[in-house]
Amino acid sequence: MDKRKTNKSDLEGKQLIFIEIGLVVALAVTLLAFEWKRYDIQKVEIDQRGDVEVMEEVVLQTEQKEKTPPPKQIAPTTTLLHIVENTVKIENEIVIDVESDESQELEEYVPIEIEAEEVKEEEIFLIVEKNPEFPGGEKGRLTYLRDNIKYPQLAKETGIQGTVWVTFVVEPDGSVSNVAVNRGIGGGCDEESIRVVKNMPKWTPGEQRGRKVRVRYNMPIKFTLQGA
């Protein structure tokens, strides 16, 4: 009986396929060989590290320091002792008895009362034989007030006007003291009146029985807006 090969075991029919596979593999190997790159090996020499000398920049100091002044020499002080004879009698001398005991009665201590001297203030006159007078008289007083009074800005803006009554005392030397406002109008006019009165020059003082005395004086100062 003749032996026959089956279709699966027959390789002669598949010879063409194996040849094609072999050609593909050979072609792939050839292409891979052409694409393969070879890098040249370079020899790198490393020099030895040497010490590098770094030059430091020298900065010259140009700032001049202020010289501190020498301390002031304090002149030595001398204390003079004045020795006197021991003949002065001390009124408040304290006697200590070393032989006394607790049963001995002690005198009650009475502190010395010193009466304070009352400073009597000179009388202020309202009416005198000769009234105090401003330098230049009444005309000089009005001229001084006109030239020195500054109308307060608040009084200008609010339209305040009127008469401020200022009271003060003319001293025996002609100076002015105890300046105050008896009746004011506000708006800064009261403060301005006090300022002007305090800066007044010395008056001719008032006299009573030929003696210069303190006299109280009342002065009206009128504030009027222009065009009112």
Image: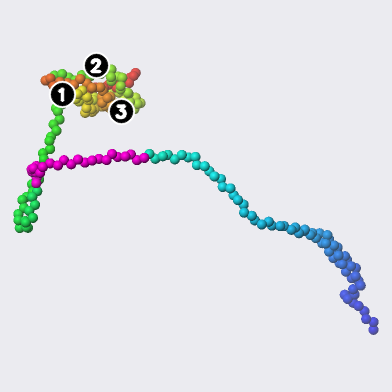
Residue 188 image label? 3
**Residue at the location (83% across, 64% down)?**
29
Instruction: Classify 140 as above or below 101.
Output: above
The CA span between labels 1 and 2 is: 21 Å
Q: Residue at x 34, y 18 (%)?
A: 227
Residue 44 shown left or right of residue 113 in the figure: right
* Nearer-N-terminus badge (1/2): 2
Q: Which mark is residue 136?
A: 2
Q: Which residues are magenta?
A: 70-93
| Residue 124 seen from this side | yes
Image-based side of 67 in relation to 124, left or right: right
Q: Is residue 218 visible?
A: no
If you read the primary sequence from the N terminus, does the residue marked by circle 3 or circle 1 appear first? Answer: 3
> Measuring 66% from the left and 57% from the top, which residue is drawn there?
48
Name the spot of residue 17 as percent of width and height, x first: 88, 68
Instruction: Judge by depth and name the residue closer to the eye, 215 or 59.
Output: 59
Say which residue label 1 marks: 213
Looking at the image, residue 203 lies above or below residue 19? above
**Residue 195 sits in quarter:** top left
Q: Dot 2 lies on which element?
A: loop
